[in-house]
Image (cartoon, grey):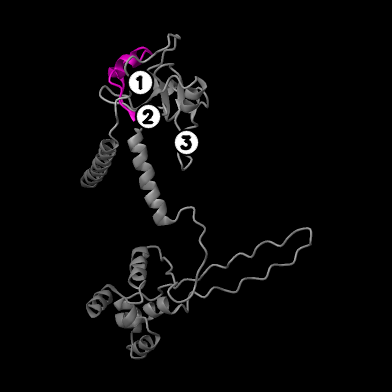
Amino acid sequence: MMVASAAEAVVAHQAAGDAEAVNTLVEDEERPVSKYAEGLVQLDNGVKISPDSSKWECAESGMKENLWLNLSTGYIGSGRKNWDGSGGTNGGLNHYTATGNQYPLAVKLGTITPTDADVYSYAPDEDQMVKVPKLGEYLKHWGINIMDLQKTDKSMAEMELDLNQNAELWAITEKGAKLEPVSGPGFTGLVNLGNSCYMNSTLQLLMASPASPLFLKYGDKAIADSLIATAPTDAPAEDPITQLAKLANGIASGDYSVAPPTPTPTPKPKSKPAPAPVPAPVRATAPMLAPTDAGLEAAAKEYE
């Protein structure tokens, strides 16, 4: 029960944080009342929209998500394609241009509630999210009772928040980037032993700067050799200073991150060009001798 309650509290906290961020986006956007909202033209073409969201789909592509209902024609089209390839197929925008740019207002299905909804104006002089005061009246023309609907899809503000958060994550993880292998002093990684990733990242961060106290004290080869030479002969693996000197010097020296020579490609017939050589992976230092908890505490005190 305690674990379940803690998990629910974490989820609720995250949801509250996301809701606050979404509200901030909406407030910053300052959506105006569309100039096309008053006296909106609505065609009497017999179209009625089912209250069952599973029956909604883009008339152009058949998409079932990110759907927009044109308030003047009753046409359902998908949203615009986002910069990262997500979103829709521009079905709603295509319909606007195909009808002579006469019917600019569209509401996003799935965001309609008794108090709010996402409405977009395709008109060139607006081209943004807008407010439509008589939205409930206009939806009733298409058989939609705004009081009966619940939110089933993400609003544009929520989608923008997701894109922003993913963009920040991709920047951190370098997703999609073509990385070149590097080696030498300052470019030595640490092999993850399954539960040492946090320790590895912390050590590499502490060793990242040549001005780091840890780098200056233990990264120099002469100092490291001196400390290793004076290590206790009976149990060197339990001596935190010895192990820290070996680890720091291994990271700083680059002795353990020498890339093997690039293999010479096998000659191919002239009709088939030789493939480009593939860089060999760079080796990393494996922390084979890790100090005990007591040793870590002693190292921390010595480092202070």
Q: Residues within 10 Å of mark 3 (few under 14, many from 20)?
A: few
Q: Which mark is residue 36?
A: 1
Question: What residue is drawn where x is 25% and y is 40%?
Answer: 24
Mark 2–mark 1 CB contact (< 8 Å):
yes
Check if residue 117 falls in the magenta segment. no
Residue 153, picture quadrant: top left
Mark before the other along the chain sequence, 1 or 3: 1
Question: What residue is drawn where x is 49% and y is 56%?
Answer: 177
Q: Secondary structure at mark 3?
A: loop
Compute the Cα span from label 2 to label 3. 19 Å
In the rendered structure, which amino acid carries the disc numbered 2? Answer: Glu
Q: Secondary structure at mark 1?
A: loop
Choose mark 2 or mark 3, whichever is in front: 2
Count of labels in the image: 3
Left or right of 13, for residue 242: right
x and y, in percent, of residue 235 in the image: 33, 84
x and y, in percent, of residue 88 in the image: 47, 33
In the rendered structure, which amino acid carries the disc numbered 3? Answer: Lys
Mark before the other along the chain sequence, 2 or 3: 3
Foreground of the two, 220 or 226? 220
Q: Which mark is residue 81?
A: 3
Q: Which mark is residue 134?
A: none
Q: Which residue is mark 2?
A: 126
Location of the N terminus by quadrant is top left
Q: Which residues are magenta?
A: 128-151
